[in-house]
Amino acid sequence: DVCSSDSNVILRSGARRDDLTVSVNASPFIWSYAKKAGYRTIFVDAQGAVVKDPSRLTNFMTVNETRNIDRYVSLNNVPPEQADFELLKIIAEETKGDQPVFLYANKNGAHFPYDATYPRDRAAFGPTMTEDGTEASFKDKAHRMASYRNSIAWSVDQFFVRFFKEVDLSNLAVVYTSDHGQAIAEGKLTHCTIENANPREGLVPLLAFASDPTLRQELEAGAKAG
């Protein structure tokens, strides 16, 4: 079962595969480690763009967990297609000072419904799922692929074009991954399958960048070992 909420809480808690149920409840959240290491902790939730109640926490986050977060931002008043770029402004602002910062940014990304994650005038691929508004186009693989490619082109490609232009990377380490993959060709659920899941549902990117030479070498060694 690879779903957004489950994956997000596992990432934040560091739960173990060999004992998932117990460890997800017993493990310290990532904020505790960051605070103990002397970092100011920041959480920016761009998925809050689809959550219009500002008091509602997402992805199984609890009030108790937020007590170790120094700045909590939910972008719930931003259109979904602009949420990641508002998130980018906060990253650039918070990482340019001298104080050590640990920032966990939850991108809206290429989240379903795909056509809500990019401006209509930036649609380079078609026909999309919503172009003719019929149920057939919603279920058709070619339509789904076009919508998803438009979403990736905007929320990932264009995001990183601006990220590398606007963020000072001289004293920064970045880890980028996703909560789940997509099985677009299935013609039913693209993820969250309970039984006999398509392996693509668990296929995600894992990229790391470090300006510090020692940390970069450690990441390279880890990549080779993995």
Image (cartoon, helix red, strand yellow):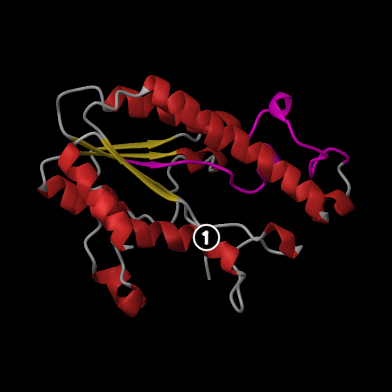
The structure residue drawn at horizontal position 24% and vertical position 33%, both measured from the top left corner, is: 211
Left or right placement of residue 214 versus residue 11 in this view: left
Q: Is 21 situated above or below 66?
A: below
Q: Quadrant of the C terminus?
A: bottom left
Q: Number of labelled discs?
A: 1
Say whether residue 116 is magenta: yes
Q: Is residue 15 visible?
A: yes
Q: Which residues are magenta?
A: 104-132
Q: Position of residue 152 (x, y in %)?
A: 60, 40
Residue 151: image quadrant is top right
Residue 194: image quadrant is bottom right
Say whether residue 128 is magenta: yes
Q: Judging from the image, what secondary structure is the residue with disc 1 in?
A: loop
Q: Which residue is mark 1?
A: 203
- Circle 1 residues within 10 Å: few <14, some 14–19, many ≥20: some
Q: Position of residue 138 (x, y in %)?
A: 81, 51
62 vs 192, nearest the viewer: 192
211 vs 5, nearest the viewer: 211
Disc 1 residue type (three-letter):
Leu
Residue 188: image quadrant is bottom right
Q: Is 120 situated above or below 146?
A: above
Left or right placement of residue 160 versus residue 146 in this view: left
Q: Is 27 situated above or below 151?
A: below
Q: Position of residue 34 (x, y in %)?
A: 18, 47
The structure residue drawn at horizontal position 25% and vertical position 57%, both measured from the top left corner, is: 29
* Main SS, magenta residues: loop
Left or right placement of residue 5 versus residue 41 in this view: right
Q: Is residue 117 visible?
A: no
The structure residue drawn at horizontal position 52% and vertical position 66%, both measured from the top left corner, is: 2
